[in-house]
Amino acid sequence: MKLAMFGLGRMGSNMARRLLRGGIGVVGWNRSRGILDTLAAEEGLEPAADPADAVARLAPPRVIWLMLPAGEVTETMLRETAARLDAGDVLVDGGNANYHDSLRRAEWLAGRGIHFVDAGTSGGVWGLDNGYCMMVGGTPEAVALVEPALRVLAPAPDRGWAHVGPPGAGHFTKMIHNGIEYGMMQAMAEGFALLHGKREFALDLAQIAELWRHGSVVRSWLLDLTADFLARDQELADVAPVVPDSGEGRWTADEAVAQGTPAPVLALALHMRFASQDREGYGHRLLAMMRRAFGGHAVVKAEDGDD
């Protein structure tokens, strides 16, 4: 099998490496040339001068795999690429995307005879060595065309990837996956914060994290990663308490509202990320003033530079 991959950032470049090492030919294109030269020299990637050149290097049915930021970047590239494809070719979106966009894109492409596969991808920077969890939406015909690549990208040919449903189902499943991820991370962070706060016990957080990795109900890959960095630094004094949200947590919360399905843990975990990003803290300033207004409570004055 030979496919083209557009977008060779941190995730895309490692996916290309894994594909090439697994015997899948990859024609690569990226806006910055450096990674193309690196992958060509180290892994045997076939660099393309531009997207049109990449498409021309493939034989039908062509498979074009996009690993681009969600939103306008992916939308523009998808439409430009579709204009160069023929009926029976496949466009795969392996980045994070709102499943509503995936549904719309699948319908638009189907009207032109082009298959669309939405591949929710999990694995992060560890995917190159451990494999990627691939949640795939699309028609059976489309998924069959990309299956050889999925079997290489996954942790094993027979596990770690699944055709979960029709177009849109892959990105929907990945969206819910990320919502759960938010909740798990928040629970673990709160628990370790409580352990850290019990100073009189002088708890060794690295020891406890390592302890919980073996036989505990809460053992997980997240705990493995936490144990690893706590073994090196438990105070984390050099880490700013700011946690960005990539967007999928918001989409998950929106879906819960749309369905009328309670998801308080997922929603609260998202809101805690918002709180961590509030540099101004205006809402908390209002709370302090309300307490003073009704109860005469003292207000802590901002130090120079705090605002």
Image (spheres, grey):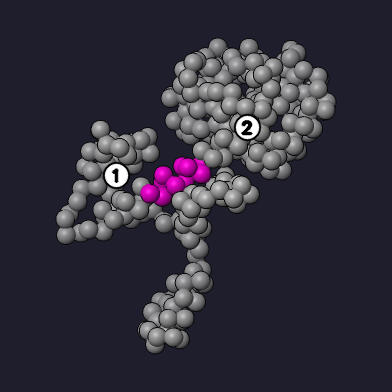
The dominant secondary structure in magenta is helix
- Amino acid carrying label 1: it is Leu
Of residues 27 and 90, the one nearer the viewer is 90
Quadrant location of the N terminus? Answer: top right
Tell whether label 2 touches label 1 (CB within 8 Å): no
Q: From the viewer's perspective, is the residue at label 1 or at label 2 nearer? A: 2
Q: Which residues are magenta?
A: 178-187
In the image, what residue occupies the spot 81% across and 20% down?
86
- Looking at the picture, how far across and down is residue 34, in whole percent? 59, 31
Q: Which residue is found at the position 83% from the left and 26% from the top? A: 112
Q: Amino acid at mark 2?
A: Ala
Q: Which numbered marker is on residue 11?
A: none
Classify 233 as above or below 194: above
Q: Between 98 and 46, which is closer to the camera in this rendering?
A: 98
Say if the magenta span includes residue 52: no
Where does residue 139 sit, x and y in percent of width and height?
69, 22
Residue 247 seen from this side: no
Task: State left or right for residue 168 relative to residue 188.
Answer: right
Q: Of marks 1 and 2, which one's residue comes earlier in the chain?
A: 2
SS of the residue under disc 2: helix
Q: Residue at x 81, y 22 (%)?
A: 113
Q: Which residue is mark 1?
A: 230
Q: Quadrant of residue 148?
A: top right
Instruction: Report helix, strand or loop for mark 1.
Output: helix
Q: Which residue is mark 2?
A: 169
